[in-house]
Image: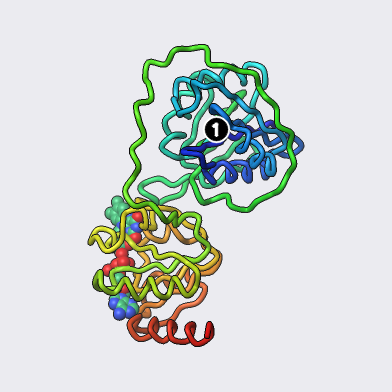
């Protein structure tokens, strides 16, 4: 199977979802190929990075592609696909991908499934995704088609499979004049920490009680070399910025260590962190549902346990 992954970049940085798409492509391609497509004005550096994880990288370069534009993206992708037929096109379920993937699918007359967290190609194309705000997971069996378009949730396919693909200049230029023009870029507020990429997360819930206590979690996180995140009430109360929220209406994380402090474990939260490699929960309620997903649970008061832990870590670090 030829599995194409449309890479994403912005402001000079390759979005890690690009590699995640290739991780998935490599795991489902069978005897086929994983092929990355990178679009922009000067994409050589991105292409080199992508080539470490793809069997082939297609570069599509033109000055007019310097900034993302859905009409131009779909135009150049359709030109490539008219020559190089994809079986599956993987796109990040990001703001960018969510915009152009359905448009691309309609041009390809392909079925599209969004926000996938699993793709099984052993018997037809079966895609797993959550519905009803994460309460249920469904397996969607796609109708047979020449090509399928699937957008992938960020932070799910992190297991890397190295490759050493060649880089090919597709020699494609946009053939349409877009009806929309790029005007300018507005930097989002804060955003200095991307919790979906962190290896260690110290996550706090309503049990932290007050904004002033976040400092305690910050101290623990810094000693562990991690970052602080939170459950929705913590964000709603303004104790942490919105981009630190874990859960269905926040981010999906898959760190090596997820330390849940004073978090009850509502399913909306669990959906965003249950695939973490190691989950340790501290909660004073032995019945808290978080213990159902935690690998290790401590029934106790975070205001006793965390300062002690901080002390021990400080001692260990000298
Ligand atoms: C549409 C929708 C989307 C949502 N999206 C999200 C989402 O993305 N992320 C999310 O997190 N939530 C989300 N929620 C909210 C979710 O339902 C829960 O309300 C929320 O996760 C609860 O957060 P919490 O565990 O911090 O608070 P609580 O449920 O109030 O739990 C606090 C926990 O702290 C423990 N505790 C208190 N004091 C201490 C102490 N001193 N030491 C140890 N333990 C202590 C308590 O025993 C309790 O278990 C969503 C809800 C809806 C309806």
In-front residue for pair 302/132 = 302
Q: Residue at 49% across / 20% down in the picture? A: 64
Q: Is residue 209 above or below residue 47?
A: below
Q: Residue at 70% across / 27% down in the picture? A: 168
Q: Left or right of 204: which side holds 48?
A: right
Task: Locate residue 120: give its quadrant.
Answer: top right
Q: Left or right of 168: which side holds 238?
A: left
In-front residue for pair 154/12 = 12
* Residue 157 x %, y %: 57, 49
Q: Quadrant of ligand 1?
A: bottom left
Count neighbours of disc 1 (C-alpha within 10 A) and say few if under 14, some if 14 to 19, many if 20 or more: some
Secondary structure under the numbered disc 1 in the rendered image: loop
- Which quadrant is home to the N terminus? top right
Residue bearing the label numbered 1: 142
Q: Can you tell me whether the CB of the residue at mark 1 lies under 8 Å from the nearest atom of ligand 1?
A: no
Q: Residue at 41% across / 53% down in the picture? A: 251
Q: How many numbered markers are drawn?
A: 1
* Residue 81 x %, y %: 62, 21
Q: How is the image coloured?
A: rainbow
Q: Residue at 45% across / 60% down in the picture? A: 273
Q: Is residue 9 above or below residue 180?
A: below
Q: Is residue 316 above or below residue 3?
A: below
Q: Is residue 122 visible?
A: no
In-front residue for pair 43/277 = 43
* Residue 38 x %, y %: 58, 31
Q: Left or right of 314: which side holds 246?
A: left
* Residue 189 x %, y %: 31, 48
Task: Locate residue 76: give its quadrant.
Answer: top right
Q: Is residue 4 visible?
A: yes
């Amino acid at each position: 199977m030829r599995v194409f992954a449309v890479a994403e970049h912005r402001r000079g940085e390759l979005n890690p979802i690009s590699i995640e798409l290739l991780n998935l492509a490599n795991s489902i391609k069978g005897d086929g190929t994983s092929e990355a497509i990178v679009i922009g004005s000067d994409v050589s550096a991105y292409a080199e990075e992508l080539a470490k994880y793809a069997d082939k990288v297609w570069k599509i370069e033109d000055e007019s592609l310097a900034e993302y534009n859905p009409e131009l993206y779909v135009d150049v992708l359709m030109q490539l696909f008219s020559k190089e037929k994809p079986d599956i096109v993987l796109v990040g379920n990001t703001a960018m991908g969510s915009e152009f993937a359905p448009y691309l699918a309609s041009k390809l007359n392909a079925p599209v499934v969004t926000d996938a967290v699993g793709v099984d190609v052993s018997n037809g194309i079966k895609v797993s995704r959550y519905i009803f705000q994460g309460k249920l997971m469904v397996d969607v069996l796609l109708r047979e088609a020449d090509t399928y378009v699937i957008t992938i949730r960020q932070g799910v396919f992190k297991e890397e499979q190295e490759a050493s693909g060649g880089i090919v200049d597709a020699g494609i230029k946009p053939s349409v004049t877009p009806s929309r023009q790029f005007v300018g870029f507005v930097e989002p507020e804060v955003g200095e920490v991307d919790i979906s990429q962190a290896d260690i997360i110290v996550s706090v819930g309503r049990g932290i009680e007050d904004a002033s206590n976040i400092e305690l979690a910050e101290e623990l996180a810094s000693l562990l070399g991690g970052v602080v995140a939170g459950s929705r009430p913590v964000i709603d109360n303004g104790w942490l910025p919105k981009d630190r929220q874990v859960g269905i209406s926040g981010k999906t994380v898959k760190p090596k260590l997820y330390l849940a402090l004073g978090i009850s474990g509502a399913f909306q939260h669990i959906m965003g962190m249950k695939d973490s490699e190691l989950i340790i929960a501290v909660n004073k309620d032995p019945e808290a549902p978080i213990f159902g997903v935690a690998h290790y649970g401590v029934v106790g008061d975070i205001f006793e346990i965390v300062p002690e832990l901080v002390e021990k870590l400080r001692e260990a670090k000298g």
